[in-house]
Image (cartoon, helix red, strand yellow):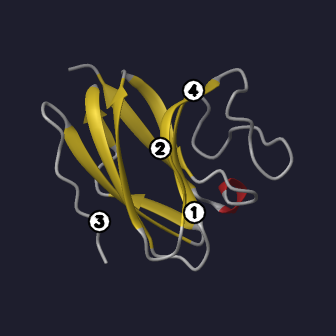
Amino acid sequence: MTPSGTPPPGGVAVNTTEREWKITADIQKVHAGPVKFTTVNLGTTEHELVIIRTDYPDGEIPLAGSKFNEDAPGVSSPGEISEYAPGAVQSTIISLAPGHYQLVCNLPTHYNHGMHIPFEVVAT
C-alpha cells in the first residue's frame, strides 16, 4: 500500500511510510506553507509521525530514557499524526515555517532504533 495525499490549496503533499525501524518520504524538502502529510503504517506495531523543528542533526536529539522530550529546549513540534495501527493510513495538514526538521516516530525506543529522517522547509 502506498499513501497518496492531495496537496492542500497553495501547498504540497508529502507521502510517508513507516515500518520497523524506518521512515521514508517521497519528498524531504518543501517550501514554507501548508503541507499535507499522509502516512501508512507498513509495520507490525503502532507508530506515529511527529514533525519536529530542531537544529539537532538527524538522529541526534538527546533522549530522556527511551524517547526524547518533545518540549525540551531546541525541539518543537508544529504537529503530528498520533499513534496509528498497522495497515492504517492517516493524514494531517500542518503549516510549516522555514527551518530544519525531522520526521520521527517518538514512541519508546523507536527514535533510537532509526525511525527519523531529515526534512527541510525553505522560504517561498
Lower sequence index among marks 2 and 1 = 1
Q: Amino acid at mark 3?
A: Pro
- Residue at which label 1 appears: 47
Q: Residue at x 59, y 54 (%)?
A: 105
Q: CA distance from mark 2 to mark 4?
A: 10 Å
Q: CA distance from mark 3 to mark 1?
A: 15 Å
- Residue at which label 2 appears: 118
94 and 65: which is toward the camera: 94
Tell me the quadrant of the picture where the C terminus can be found.
top left
- Residue at which label 4 appears: 55
Lower sequence index among marks 2 and 3 = 3
Element type where label 2 sits in the image:
strand
Q: Which quadrant would residue 92 be assigned to in this image? A: top left
**Residue 3's disc number:** 3
Lower sequence index among marks 4 and 1 = 1
Lower sequence index among marks 2 and 4 = 4
Q: Residue at x 65, y 22 (%)?
A: 74
Q: Residue lying at the far right in this picture: please name it.
A: 65
107 and 32: which is toward the camera: 107
Q: Amino acid at mark 2?
A: Pro
Tell which tag, 2 or 1, sits nearer the viewer.
Answer: 1
Q: Is residue 14 toward the left or the right of residue 76 in the image?
A: left
Q: Amino acid at mark 4?
A: Asp
Element type where label 1 sits in the image:
strand
Element type where label 4 sits in the image:
loop
Q: Residues within 10 Å of mark 3 (few under 14, many from 20)?
A: some
Tell which tag, 3 or 4, sits nearer the viewer.
Answer: 3
